[in-house]
Amino acid sequence: MSNTVNLDWSKLGFSYIKTDLRYVSKWKDGQWDEGQLVEDNNLNISEASTALHYGQQCFEGLKAYRTKDNKIQLFRPDQNSKRLNSSCRRVLMPEVPEDKFIDACIQVVKANEAFVPPYGTGATLYLRPFVIGVGDNLGVRPAPEYIFSIFCSPVGPYFKGGMAPVNFIISDFDRAAPYGTGAAKVGGNYAGSLYPHKLAVEQGFADCIYLDPMTHTKIEEVGAANFFGITKDDKFVTPKSPSILPSITKYSLMHIAKEYLGMEVEERDVLVERLDEYKEAGACGTAAVISPIGGIQYKENMHVFHSLTEVGPVTKKLYDTLVGIQIGDVKAPEGWMVEVK
């Protein structure tokens, strides 16, 4: 393993740091080219690209981790590949074969190995794969050409000074339309969330929670993350809806809750009027793994879960187990970790 770059790993946030190389592959005339690693972190695309005008694009996020014995591993890249292709299908872009996707991830990590943070720092190497529609085009139609690219950036531990609960407010806005693109990881979903997020932060909350767009009675997503709750009888419950982005972290936590912690797991409606069913709650996603939820403001009422200041014991156990698997300290389920060799 090569030496790492000289960065203060404890001071890293979740922000862009230019690394040495990124992967770029182009689709033209019905096929992807071989793809290559390039130094330039700027893309040169047509001013008429569908990605710029009609939002024909999607992206992914995953991480590479360094283990105690200095191996580097990726967490479930096959799942990111499947979700990327599901997003591509939704906005009529060509799919990226799974072996090409995983190979590209490995190439990027190896090429930027010096930026993979050391074991024990809490920092990781974040990978951002994306597909965009490019080429000269004017009408509302799929692009004539596409780019699939992956760049990476080292990111710090999400919780500086330990995991602490944060509070959220129920938004009046919808994140996605009932039969829209909520289940695809496309940029438009995020652009639409910027304003509700700003309003929530101005009111002193970490972010807002979106209810289902059809009836506004059920919790769907927490900002850009998935929701889960722990019931008073120790069930792991998470919302089920066609307009939720299927979180790889969430499905991993469902497996861990069942197989590692022996809990019952339910994917079902989470009614906002019945938050008192849950003794703990959290938001989960690639960046934070789990953000514990202290309280949720709904209309005039602030519902507090375990505590506004301390993480609940089940949430802590879920977090420790998943992070342990990712950094190689806990035995992973078959096929979850892919070593970068």
Image (tube, rainbow, N blue to C red):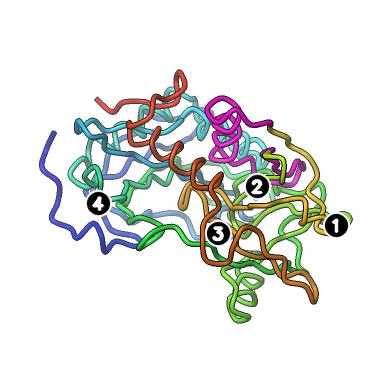
Q: Label 2, label 3: how many angstroms apart (C-alpha)?
A: 34 Å
In percent of the image, x 38 and y 29: which residue is there?
330
Point out which mark residue 19 bears.
Answer: 4
- The tag earlier along the polypeptide, 2 or 3, is 3
Q: Is residue 45 above or below residue 166?
A: above
Report the residue marked by disc 3.
Answer: 52
Front in this rendered view, residue 276 or 157: 276
Q: Is residue 210 above or below residue 74?
A: below
* Residue 320 point in image, percent of width and height: 43, 42
Query: Real-space Cα distance between discs 4 and 3?
Result: 25 Å
- Residues at marks 2 and 1, CA–CA distance in whole angstroms: 16 Å
Which callout, 2 or 3, points to the residue nearer the camera?
2
Under mark 4, the amino acid is Thr
Spatial CA distance of label 2 from label 4 is 34 Å
Q: Which residue is mark 1?
A: 217
Q: Quote the CA–CA distance across marks 4 and 1.
A: 44 Å
What residue span does the magenta drawing correspond to? 235-264
Asked if the residue under mark 1 is in contact with the one under mark 2, i.e. CB atoms within 8 Å, the reply is: no
Mark 3 nearby-residue class (10 Å; few <14, some 14–19, many ≥20): some
Secondary element at tag 2: strand
Tell me where residue 300 appears, x and y as whole percent. Answer: 79, 77
